[in-house]
Amino acid sequence: MSKNQVLVTGGTGYIGSHTVVELQNQGYEVIIVDDLSNSEIEVVDRIEKITGKRPFFEELDLVNESGVEALFKKYPNIGSVIHFAAFKAVGESVKEPLKYYQNNICSLINLLNSMKKYKVENMVFSSSCTVYGQPEDLPVTESAKVQPAESPYGNTKQICEEILRDTVKAFPEIKAIALRYFNPVGAHSSALIGELPKGVPQNLVPFITQTAIGLRDQLSVFGDNYNTPDGSAIRDYIHVVDLAKAHIIAAERLLENKNEEGYEFFNLGTGTGSSVLEVINAFEKVNDIPVNYKIVDRREGDVEQIWADTTIANEILGWKAESGIDEMMESAWKWEQAIRKGNA
Ligand code: UD1
C-alpha cells in the first residue's frame, strides 16, 4: 500500500482545519493530531459536514516523545506531515518563554525523529513573516535577511526553520518546505469553521468582528502616526482558504520530488498591503455595519509596514491568492455571526 495519508498537526486549529478540508476535497486521507489546547473537538464534526468525510483524530501533545512514536507506528501509511501545531500568542511568549520554546521546538524535534525512524520523508512547516522583522525593502522577498526576533514566539519560528535546514542537510531523505505566512484572516464560505480565539482576541480581524457583534465595546487602533498614507500600520492580509490551498501544493511538490534543494521556504501573501483603517473600512462597507473604534498608542513590538513579494510562490509553486480584502471581511463576519447564533 502506498503512503498516501497526510498527518496534519494542529488540524483542529484555525489554519489546520481549513487545510484538512482542502486536503480531503482533493481526495487525501487525513490524520489530525491535536492536543485541543486552543481548539475544540467539534471541529472534526464540522470538517465532516463540509467534506462528507471524517478525518482520523488523535488527541496528543507532540511534546510527548513516546506518544509521537506510537502515532507513526499506528499509521504506517503517512506520506507527509503538515505541521501547524504551535503556540502563537506574541505577548504570552514574552511572559512565558520556556512554555513557547518547549512546545514549539520539542514538538518539531519529536516529529522529525519519528519521521526518520518510520521513513516519512516530507514536511510542510508553518512559519511566519515575523522572521523578517521590519524589512528594509518592500515588498519583502525571500532573499530579505532574517532579523533578530522581537519575541520568543518569533524566535521559535526562526529556530524551527534552522532545525529543518540542518536536518535536511544531514538526512537528505527528509525534505521540507517552510511557508512564511503573512496575516491569515477570514473563514470557510460554509461558516462552519473559522478562527475561534479564546478570551480577548489579540489579532485585528477577530477584534473587529467581536466589536461589530457587540461582544467588545470598542476596537483600539494601535497608532495613526506611522509613516504610511493614512498613518496606520500596513499588513498583507491573506484569506485562510487561499493559504490552506498552498499547503497541498507544497506537500505535492515534496511528494513529487520537485524540490531539488531539499529545504525551501516561500512567502504566502497576496502581494498587497492594507492599513488597519483600510481593513476596518472594508469590513464596514462590505457588511454594511459600523465598527466602533478609537485611535490609541502604538502597540509595542509592531512593525510599521510589511507586505509580500509573492513572485517565487507564484512561479515555483504555481500558486496565487485569489480572494481580496472584501471576501476576507465578508467571510469573517459570516463566521462571527454563525458562532454567536450557535450554528457553528
Ligand atoms: C502577529 C505576529 C505574527 C503572528 C500573528 C498571529 C509579529 C510582528 N506579528 O501579527 O508573527 O503570526 O500575530 O498571531 O509578531 N491591531 C490593532 N488593534 C487590535 C489588534 C491589532 O490596531 O486590536 C493592528 C496591529 O497593530 C497591526 C495589525 O492590526 O498593525 C495586525 O495585527 P495582528 O492581527 O495582531 O497581526 P500582526 O501583529 O501583524
Image (spheres, rainbow, N blue to C red):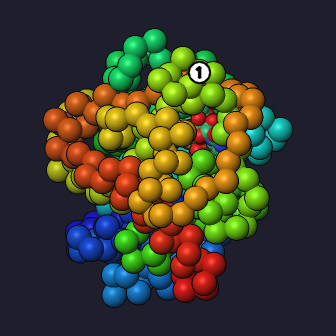
In the picture, the quarter occupied by the C terminus is bottom right
Q: Position of residue 71 (x, y in %)?
A: 52, 68
Residue beneath label 1, please?
Answer: 226
Within 10 Å of the Cα at label 1, are there few (<14), some (14-19), or many (20+) other Cα atoms?
A: some
Tell me the residue at 54%/17% (across/down): 227
- Quadrant of the rendered structure where residue 21 is? bottom left
Kindly identify the amino acid type of the residue bearing the numbered disc 1.
Tyr
- Percent of width and height locating residue 320: 23, 45
- Can you tell me whether the CB of the residue at mark 1 lies under 8 Å from the nearest atom of ligand 1? no
Compared across the picture, whether 120 is left or right of 94 comes to left
Q: List the single residue furthest toward the right.
A: 95
Residue located 44% across and 50% down the image? 282
Where residue 74 sits in the image (x, y, percent)? 48, 74
Confirm whether residue 1 shows in the render: yes
Instruction: Give residue 125's position: percent from left, percent from top.
Output: 44, 45
Q: Quadrant of ligand 1?
A: top right
Apparent side of residue 27 relative to residue 55 in the rendered image (left or right)? left
